[in-house]
Amino acid sequence: MTTDEYRAFRELHRPGDPLLLPNAWDHASAAALAARGHRAIGTTSLGVAAAAGRPDAVRATGAETLELAYRLRDLPTLLTVDVEDGFHDDPAEVAGFVGELAALGVVGVNLEDGRPDGRLAPAEHVAAVIAAVRAAVPQMVVNARTDAWWLGVPAPLGEARRRAALFRAAGADCLFVPGAPDDLVGVLAGEVGLPLNVLYRPGGPDLAALGRLGVARVSTGSLLFRAALGAALHLTDAIGAGRDPGLPAPPGYEEVQALVQPSAT
């Protein structure tokens, strides 16, 4: 991975003009999104885990995550990978894993502070993980995620502020706050001192509205994977019931076949 590619990914994070980062779960979904012209694509840990028949957020898919990065390495897009909490307690082990991803051409990682037991990891420990990654792979774009709202901690805004300061000091490049209420997004964007990443929510603010709040990156998370699964169920139910499914025409056989590259087989 060249310095220019890391720089290009950083420069896509513009407060007020947010990057739409769609999240893929396999080669086909990533290749299709790249073919639509997305300059950067993320992975979704839920999609990767569910596709492999494993649970999410319990450190069960380190090998699958690495394998997916290997399969996506030649796509014409920048790739950032969701690594849950790093799949290990030891910051050095996490840094080593991120180094393996960097060797495959990955330019960014998403590191979360939620633990497999449903609690937040100590903020100081997460900061140590971020610092270890920064030392091992200095140019990697680290998106530090806090689950303060998702895990229902007391006073989540204050906790997110505290963690943002620690993560920034440790070397994080961006702060990800899934679940933050809409009326606090602008507050966070103005206060945390890092480009702010939020999760797109159907029915919530659109990309332009989030931009006006100062957001720099909008991720789809597991939404695309869940939507694809929902469409498959809807179509199957409609066929069984003899009714028109009312869905857009799916990509044709040749279009999907064209997404497959020799290195991905």
Image (cartoon, helix red, strand yellow):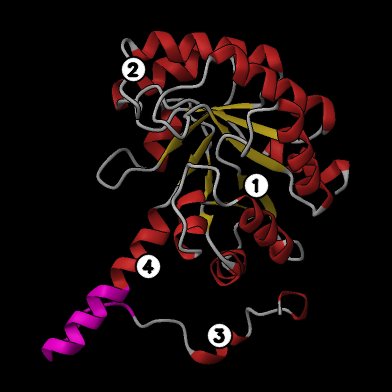
Residue type indicated by callout 2: Val
Q: Is residue 244 above or below residue 213?
A: below
- Residue ID at (56%, 91%): 254
Q: Disc 1 marks which residue? A: 80
Q: Secondary structure at mark 3?
A: helix
Res. 255 mark: 3
Disc 4 designates what residue?
228
Residue in the picture at 80% in, 41% down? 99
Q: Secondary structure at mark 1?
A: strand
Q: Identify the mark nearer the N-term, 3 or 1.
A: 1
Q: Quadrant of the C terminus?
A: bottom right
x and y, in percent, of residue 117 in the image: 42, 31
Q: Nearer the viewer, mark 4 or mark 2?
A: 2
Within 10 Å of the Cα at label 2, are there few (<14), some (14-19), or many (20+) other Cα atoms?
some
Please, what is the three-letter code of the amino acid marked with disc 4? Answer: Ala
Q: Is residue 227 above or below residue 265?
A: above
The answer to whether residue 154 is left or right of residue 239 is: right
| Disc nearer the start of the sequence (4/2) | 2
Mark-to-mark CA distance, 4 and 1: 21 Å
Front position among marks 2 and 1: 2
